[in-house]
Every structure is written in structure tokens, then in C-alpha cells.
Image: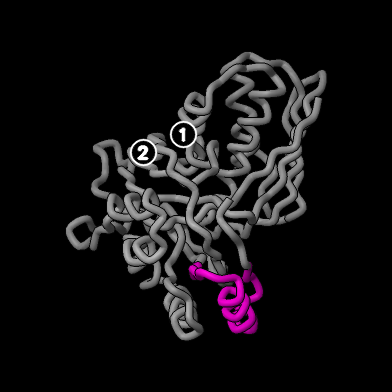
Amino acid sequence: MKTVEKACAKLNLGLDTPFRHDDGEIEWEMLMTSIDLADYVEIITSKGNGISVHCNRVFLPQDQRNLAYQAALLLKKKFNVHQKVKINIKKNIPVAAGMGGGSSDAAAVIRGLNRLWDLHMSDQEMATFGLQLDSDVPYCVYSQTAMVTGKGDDIELMPKLPKMYFVVVKPKVSVSTPEILNKINYDKLKHVDIDGLANAVSTQDYDDIISHMGNVLEPLSSKHHAEIKRIKEKFEKYGADSAQMSGTGPTVFGICKTESQAKHIFNSIRGFCSEVYIVRPV
């Protein structure tokens, strides 16, 4: 049997962390949206055993280090399924970008195998299961604008965003998420008004969304990667309504109200960075 799942990238319109749990896990307060930049994950099941992952980006791990592989392995164990699983990933989302590419691929595998194996897991059950893999996987199971709290597993779906365009820029630097999270000093964080942002999304107020956006980790990542700040300055120079880092970075995105504005910024920035995209929320 075979299925193909679309695995959308995500952006953090708002990202905050109020505290760290005693077990070292981060408590999150985030407002995320998914965009129409996506990987495509083909899942084929057949008689036999074993799991294989193939990807059009050869430098990506295609073994147990890959979250899609881990998702299939955990599902096989949990439901005692004895079948061969072949996963083919067509990668379009930039790698190590703070856009949830690996998590979205894993969520796609969970959704796909849930259907192929008739596991009858609800979205909430799939999200809870996905938390074993990464804190972004529960959100990626839903892949629509949502408030994300707790350790990443408390998902409150939000209305669709008003009409807007994102120009997404992935610089040629890699950010280590564990390294950034370990450097958080909670006494010095400048927190983001996530509730205010959620209210702006609920009322579909574009200007209010812009004014409430923020990423509490941006100063931390920018300190170690000057490229983040430079790209943000270019967005401001070329007329984006707002710009900020997604996740732990290094991807920076600018928000525009019109497509013509987005195209102007895209053409202006493309000369400085090879990975630039115009996308819309899904």
C-alpha cells in the first residue's frame, strides 16, 4: 500500500518560553503557522520487515537519526505491526532552518501510517505520540495556524490568517537548537505578548498581528550568528511590514500585505542569499 503526505514548513509568528521544567524540558508559548513551502513524503508498506528512508538531499541522514525513520519505528513497536516501510522524501524545506522540516516529515509519516495501518488514532493522539520525537511534531500533525503551549503538545487551533505574504530567507549558517536552548537565561528574557498576538489573529487584524509578533530567542541566536541581524536589516531597508527569526533560526522571514511588495523584497534580497522564497500561509 502507498500514500503521499504533504509536509508543510512552519513559521513562528510568536515564540516565548516562560520557564524550564525540572526535567530540563522547555515550557513553550508559541503561535505558529504553516506555509505553502512543503516536503512530499511517500510512504510504501509491504510484506517483510525493516524501514528504509530515501531523500533527494543526499547529505541528510537516512537511518535512525532521521525523525521520519524514528516515527515509523516507534509506530511499529507501539502497535506491533510487522510490515516493511519505505519512506521517500522529496525535500523542499531548507534543512536546519528553524522551519520544522524534519518534524513535519515525521508528522507526515505518523498521519500516513495511521491511515495505511488503520490505527484509528485521532489528531490529538497522533500529536501526543509525536511529542516523543520532537517538540514541533505535535503542531506539524495539524499543520495549521495554532497556539502551542506546554512542552509542545497543547495545541489550540486558530482561525486562518488574513491575507499576507512571507518572504523567507535561509542564510548559509546552521544553528544548533540544543546549544541555543541551553544558553537561555530566564532572568534576562524580554517576553513576547503571545496572548495579544493570538487575539490579533482571532480578530484578523493584520496591523495588530505585526505589532505583537516576536521571538524571545532571536537576540540569543543573533548574538552567535550576525547573519540573522543583517538579513533582518535588509527586510527593514526594502520595506517589509515586519521581520523576525523563526524558531531558533537561522531563517528570517518578512511579512508583506501585498504580493507586489513581497516580489520587490524577494528580488532585492535574492542577490545576497541563494535560499529565498515567497510563500503564503496555508
Q: Which residue is mark 2?
A: 151
> Which quadrant holds residue 27?
top left
- The residue lying furthest to the left in this view is 187
Residue 214: in sight, yes or no?
Answer: no
Q: Residue at x 44, y 55 (%)?
A: 12
Distance between the alpha carbons at the discs numbered 1 and 2:
8 Å
Taking 3 as reference, is 153 left or right?
Answer: left
Q: Residue at x 60, y 19 (%)?
A: 77
Quadrant assignment for the N terminus: top right
Asked if 240 appears above or below 119 in the picture, the reply is below
Q: Residue at x 62, y 31 (%)?
A: 111
Location of residue 172 in the rendering, given as x and y in whole percent from the top left corner: 58, 71
Tag 2: amino acid: Lys
Location of residue 179 in the rendering, given as x and y in whole percent from the top left corner: 40, 57
Q: Is residue 51 one of those drawn in magenta?
A: no
Residue 217 numbered tag: none
Q: Nearer the viewer, residue 117 or 35?
A: 35
Question: Residues in magenta?
Answer: 253-277
Asked if 24 appears above or below 173 in the picture, the reply is above
Location of residue 257 in the rendering, given as x and y in whole percent from the top left corner: 50, 69
Taking 91 as reference, is 205 left or right?
Answer: left
Q: Nearer the viewer, residue 15 or 262?
A: 262
Please tell me how crowded label 1 is: few (under 14), some (14-19), or many (20+) other residues with Cα within 10 Å. some
Please tell me how crowded label 2 is: few (under 14), some (14-19), or many (20+) other residues with Cα within 10 Å. some
Q: Nearer the viewer, residue 114 or 259?
A: 259
Taking 270 as reference, is 210 left or right?
Answer: left
Tag 1: amino acid: Leu
Q: Which residue is mark 1?
A: 131
